[in-house]
Image (cartoon, helix red, strand yellow):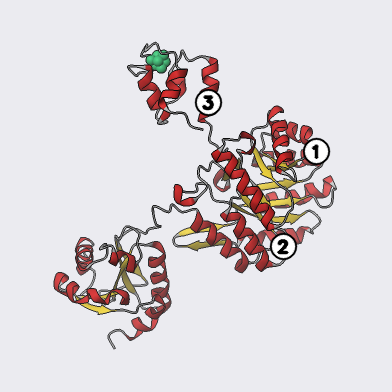
């Protein structure tokens, strides 16, 4: 739990010596509480105070990094139970389960399929994040061979799945540069797995079937010196997992319960793609750091990625595109000019429909603070005045030889005032973006 400035002050030397650059210890404490300075600026702080302050400064859920480079996956470091309280910070990593009993050809094919699970939505990339390789064969050489195929075929981070420390050690030897996730430490193997986690500096999954056993296991791993942990409550039904994950999150955030101050991993149980999508979506919503899927269909994965994207946006700041003039296709001075808001979903929906019409057009995106058309109109962010200002600011008249602008059908009511304000002829477009292709094809006929 974060300490207040006064609580921090009580732990400082209180000599007001100014060596930290602040006039008093209290002033330094206030800056420390606001996380604007670091504790090491005070050279006289005692070891006891340091320990107390450092543990208070730790996030309630530790940030865990798996993999390296551009594709590294960061999970945890969340601060709230409910998204509307602030926001969720580190999106759930979506992973795919592969088995070492598959042939090399099948593994390569699976990697190709996973590579294609990479989509663009409202201007952002949403994609797969991690491969979980299971040692189903229980044979070290087969596991190693399969791992080599994975390491050659993808830059995605890898979770190594075996309960056998000797098999894990060999796999870690060949993947140590990739900072893999070790799955898993249990009550039976935790000492050996802890040694491997420390030796290879790789995060480790602690797995136990009950929360009580999980608490004990994490404490044992901490005592062995392992701090980078991901929690797993084993194979269970969706309701039980939801219960586990909610309790873990609550205890970590509300009670600062250190054994549960780590992100969690979930494996879907269902083989059936629709069921699996529902299961995975539940875990994304509450509160998995990683969800590992069995199916790799684009149509069953896309809804999960979309849900994740929606949940991990800032609820206070809608996704926005830059308010500017966009050229769609090979525009000319005769091309139509469509006006819309800068809410990403609105803009990209309009853009997709304009593209599909094959009629080169300009889209003028007005700054509506990320609100959709009707909301922005109701909030007076998308009005005759704001559209007029935008047309002027962007110099739209210099791009085209006509003075005709198309507004969304939902704000047809603006047309008269907009004509007066801007001096442009206003044409009311369709209400729904899906009507844009036929509207543009018939425009001017
Ligand atoms: S250096 Fe430490 S003891 Fe000196 S004023 Fe700053 S906080 Fe207080």
Q: Using residue 164 as the reference point, say whether residue 394 is left or right of it.
A: left
Q: Quadrant of the C terminus?
A: bottom left
Q: Residue at x 39, y 10 (%)?
A: 15
Q: Quick check: marks 2 and 3 in contact, CB under 8 Å?
A: no
The image position of residue 419, as x and y in percent, is 17, 75
Q: Is residue 194 visible?
A: yes
Q: Is residue 155 visible?
A: no
Alpha-carbon span between mark 2 and mark 3: 42 Å
The image position of residue 219, as x and y in percent, is 69, 32
The image position of residue 307, as x and y in percent, is 54, 60
User: According to the image, label 1 marks what residue?
Assistant: 165
Q: Quadrant of residue 333?
A: bottom left
Local packing at callout 3 (Cα closer than 10 Å; few below 14, some 14-19, many 20+) is few
Q: Earlier in the sequence, mark 2 or mark 3?
A: 3
Q: Residue at x 57, y 37 (%)?
A: 255
Residue 54 tag number: 3
Local packing at callout 1 (Cα closer than 10 Å; few below 14, some 14-19, many 20+) is some
Task: Residue at the far bottom: name it.
Answer: 445
Q: Quadrant of residue 374?
A: bottom left
Q: Residue at x 67, y 47 (%)?
A: 158
For ligand 1, which image quadrant applies? top left
3 vs 1, front mark: 3
Q: Using residue 254 as the reference point, say whether residue 105 is left or right of it.
A: right
Of residues 15 and 365, the one drawn nearer to the viewer in this rendering: 15
Of residues 150 and 404, the one drawn nearer to the viewer in this rendering: 404
Q: Quick check: marks 3 and 1 in contact, CB under 8 Å?
A: no
Vertical comparison of 227 with 404: above or below: above
Q: Earlier in the sequence, mark 2 or mark 1?
A: 1
Dot 2 beta carbon under 8 Å from ligand 1: no
The image position of residue 376, as x and y in percent, is 31, 64
User: According to the image, label 2 marks what residue?
Assistant: 270
Alpha-carbon span between mark 2 and mark 1: 28 Å
């Amino acid at each position: 739990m974060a300490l207040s400035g006064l609580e921090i002050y009580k732990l400082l030397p209180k000599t007001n010596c100014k060596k930290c650059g602040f006039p008093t210890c209290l002033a330094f404490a206030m800056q420390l509480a606001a996380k604007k300075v670091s504790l090491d600026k005070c050279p006289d702080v005692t070891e006891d105070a340091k320990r107390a302050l450092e543990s208070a400064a730790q996030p309630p859920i530790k940030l865990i990094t798996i993999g390296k480079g551009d594709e590294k996956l960061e999970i945890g470091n969340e601060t709230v139970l409910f998204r509307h309280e602030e926001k969720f910070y580190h999106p759930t990593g979506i992973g795919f389960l592969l088995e070492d009993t598959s042939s090399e050809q099948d593994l390569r094919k699976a990697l190709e399929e996973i590579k294609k699970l990479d989509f663009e939505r409202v201007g952002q990339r949403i994609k797969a994040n991690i491969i979980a390789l299971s040692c189903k064969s229980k044979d070290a050489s087969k596991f190693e061979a399969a791992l080599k195929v994975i390491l050659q075929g993808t830059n995605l981070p890898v979770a190594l799945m075996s309960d056998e420390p000797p098999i894990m050690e060999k796999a870690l030897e060949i993947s140590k540069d990739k900072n893999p996730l070790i799955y898993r430490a249990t009550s039976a193997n935790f000492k050996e797995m802890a040694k491997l986690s420390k030796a290879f500096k790789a995060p480790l999954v602690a797995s136990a079937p009950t929360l009580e056993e999980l608490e004990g296991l994490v404490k044992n791993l901490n005592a062995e010196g392992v701090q980078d942990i991901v929690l797993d409550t084993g194979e269970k039904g969706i309701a039980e997992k939801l219960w586990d994950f909610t309790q873990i999150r609550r205890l970590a955030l509300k009670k600062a319960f250190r054994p549960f101050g780590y992100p969690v991993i979930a494996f879907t149980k269902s083989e059936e793609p629709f069921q699996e999508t529902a299961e995975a979506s539940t875990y994304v919503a509450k509160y998995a750091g990683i969800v590992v899927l069995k199916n790799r269909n684009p149509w069953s994965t896309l809804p999960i990625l979309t849900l994740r994207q929606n949940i991990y946006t800032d609820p206070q700041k809608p996704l926005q595109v830059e308010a500017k003039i966009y050229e769609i296709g090979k525009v000319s001075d005769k091309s139509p000019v469509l006006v819309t808001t800068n809410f990403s979903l609105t803009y990209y929906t309009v853009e997709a429909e304009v593209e599909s019409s094959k009629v080169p057009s300009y889209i003028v995106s007005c700054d509506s603070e990320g609100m959709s058309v009707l909301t922005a109109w109701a909030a007076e962010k998308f009005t005759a005045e704001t559209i007029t200002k935008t047309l002027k600011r962007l110099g739209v008249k210099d791009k085209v030889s006509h003075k005709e602008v198309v507004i969304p059908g939902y704000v047809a009511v603006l047309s008269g005032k907009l004509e007066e304000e801007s001096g442009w002829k206003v044409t009311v477009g369709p209400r729904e973006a899906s009507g844009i292709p036929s509207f543009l094809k018939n425009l001017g006929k």
